[in-house]
Structures are given as C-alpha cells and as structure tokens.
Image (tube, rainbow, N blue to C red):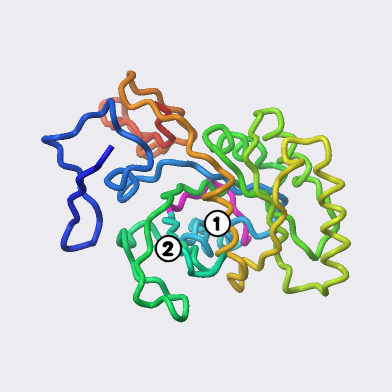
C-alpha cells in the first residue's frame, strides 16, 4: 500500500492528511504515525543504580530523574518517561551497527547519516519508542510492576562491576517472567569499569542466571551508558528483537492508568475540588 506523506516544512516531520485518513488501514509503522507518536513501549528494569535512567538518557537524550528527592538520592522513585526515535542509514553499505542511530522524539524524519563516508546519505525512521524508566529499589517494587504492565519489551540492566544476580535483578526478571514478557534485551552496563577477563566471567554468570527464564535466549550486549558505548548496537537490537505489537485503531479506547496526579491542595473545600490528571498507555 503506497502512503502519501505530507512533510512539515518547519520541523521535517510527517503530517497526516485528515481528509484522507482511514483508521482501518493505519499501521504503527506508517511514517505519518511514528513521525509524531511513539508506537511501542520499552521498559528499563534491573537492580538499583545499575544504570537504567542513564541508558534511557543515552538513547533519548532525556533525563528522566527530575524530582527533587530523586536528584538528592540519585535514584528513580517515580516512573520516568522519555520518547526516542531510532533511524537506519538508507545505504545498505553503511556498516553495522553504526548505521543505526537514536535521537530524541523531536528529531526530523530523515536526518543525515554521520558515519564517515556516508555523510551524503539520509537515514530512515525505523522506530519511535516510549521508554518507561522503572525504579530499582526494593521498596518501589509496586511502582516497577505498574510500569511493566504496559511495556512491549524490556531492557534488563546488569552492572558489570557487581556480582550477578543482585536482589532486584532477580525480582524484576521474575516479575516480567510472570507477565510472560518475552522480548528482553540484556545490557551488561558499566563495561568500562572492568577488564576483559572480569567481563567474560560475568557474561557467563548472566547466562547461567537467565537459564530457564523468558530471557534465556535474550542477547547480552556489553555497554557503557555513561560513555554511550554500543548504544548503536542497542538501537539495532530494539528494531530487530522487539516486534511491534498488533494495534487496534477502531475498537473503543482501552487505557491502562499507571499513575495519577491530584492537583488539589490539602484541605481544599468540596466546591474547590478540580479533579486530577491520569497518565498511562492506550492499548487500543
């Protein structure tokens, strides 16, 4: 099916022609859809301080740790959100994995490739993902489960400079195991802090840990979220290993609410109540 796509001159983003819109034929990967809207949810899970928020920032450019108490303690307490676009160079000769690149949600649809020798090539938008940054602390397990309820795939962060598994590493994997989440990518983070021998030994420990779980066949990617090392590999795996789920654009809306905000001040009188704000994901 050939799609006619209007491009906004100001931002380089595709625009839907509402006069010709047929929701029965919409697909989550149509250019005019993923240009402005994330169509797949990916959660970051793992033990506290293993780099979940840092990997989200490396992929999207967005800092999800925003609240004062989070910044003071340097941990994620509330669910964090950030959208990112993943591109691939149009030239098949552009070497992997450098041909893949991730940017923030506002990036134009066809940026120029920055791989040496391919600077005249354009990149095509392959995915627009919504990253759900889940907290890793044990007392915040309920918050993590709320986030995991809406994700289509997960990035399991395991710090390379610690033994595997750590308590919340095991708990988070068991949780997504019960949810039957099959699309998981394991990131062996902080690889820059250890030598090759230690990295190999921990890689073997990770393989032993994930045996007989939903993550048994998951790829294990050594990364440094802080240095943005191998983020292009992560981008490629997101495109190739986490499929776009079936989306229903015609049924009555169904939304999972995973957080809410009460805008009323404590002690407000009944006639002053203004309601609140609910956040979540529309599943159909």
Describe residue 164's horizontal placement relative to residue 258 as left or right.
right
Res. 44 mark? none
Alpha carbons under labels 2 and 1: distance apart: 13 Å
Q: How many marks?
A: 2
Q: Residue at x 78, y 63 (%)?
A: 160
Residue that sits furthest to the top in the current view: 252
Say whether residue 270 is left or right of residue 51. left
With respect to residue 100, does 239 lie above or below? above
Quarter residue 270 falls in: top left
Asked which secondary structure carries label 2, the reply is: strand
Residue 3 location, quadrant: top left
Determine crowd level at label 1: few under 14, some 14-19, many 20+ residues with C-alpha closer than 10 A: many
Mark 1 lies on residue: 236
Q: Is residue 136 magenta?
A: no
- Residue 63 sits above or below residue 152 on the image: below
Residue 97 locus on image (x, y percent): 57, 65
Question: The N terminus lies in which quarter of the figure?
Answer: top left
Residue 47 position (above or below residue 222): above
Q: Residues within 10 Å of mark 2 (few under 14, many from 20)?
A: many
Whole-percent x, y for residue 49 in the image: 69, 58
Which residues are drawn in magenta? 73-83
Q: Nearer the viewer, residue 164 or 112?
A: 112
Residue denoted by label 2: 103
Please provide percent x and percent y for residue 74: 62, 62
- In the image, is 50 to the left or to the right of 31? right
Q: Is residue 82 magenta?
A: yes
Residue 155 screen position, x and y as percent: 62, 49
């Amino acid at each position: 099916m050939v799609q006619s796509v209007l491009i906004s001159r100001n931002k380089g983003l595709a625009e839907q022609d509402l006069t010709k819109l047929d929701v029965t034929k919409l697909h989550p990967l149509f250019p005019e859809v993923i240009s402005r809207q994330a169509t797949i949810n990916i959660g970051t899970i793992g033990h506290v301080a293993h780099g979940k928020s840092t990997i989200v920032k490396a992929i999207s450019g967005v800092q999800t740790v925003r609240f004062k108490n989070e910044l003071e303690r340097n941990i994620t307490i509330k669910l964090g959100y950030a959208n990112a676009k993943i591109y691939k160079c149009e030239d098949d000769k552009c070497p992997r994995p450098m041909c893949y690149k991730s940017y923030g949600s506002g990036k134009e649809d066809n940026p120029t490739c920055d791989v040496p020798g391919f600077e005249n090539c354009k990149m095509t938008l392959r995915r627009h993902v919504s990253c759900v940054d889940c907290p890793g602390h044990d007392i915040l397990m309920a918050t993590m489960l709320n986030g995991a309820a809406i994700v289509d795939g997960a990035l399991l962060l395991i710090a390379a400079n610690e033994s595997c598994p750590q308590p919340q590493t095991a708990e988070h994997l068991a949780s997504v195991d019960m949810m039957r989440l099959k699309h998981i990518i394991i990131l062996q983070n902080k690889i820059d802090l250890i030598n090759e021998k230690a990295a190999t030994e921990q890689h073997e420990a990770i393989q032993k840990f994930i045996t007989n779980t939903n993550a048994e066949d998951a790829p294990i990617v050594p990364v440094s979220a802080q240095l943005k090392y191998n983020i292009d590999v992560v981008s490629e795996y997101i495109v190739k290993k986490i499929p776009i789920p079936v989306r229903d654009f015609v049924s009555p809306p169904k939304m999972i609410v995973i957080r809410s905000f009460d805008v009323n001040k404590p002690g407000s009188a009944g006639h002053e109540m203004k309601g609140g704000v609910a956040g979540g994901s529309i599943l159909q």
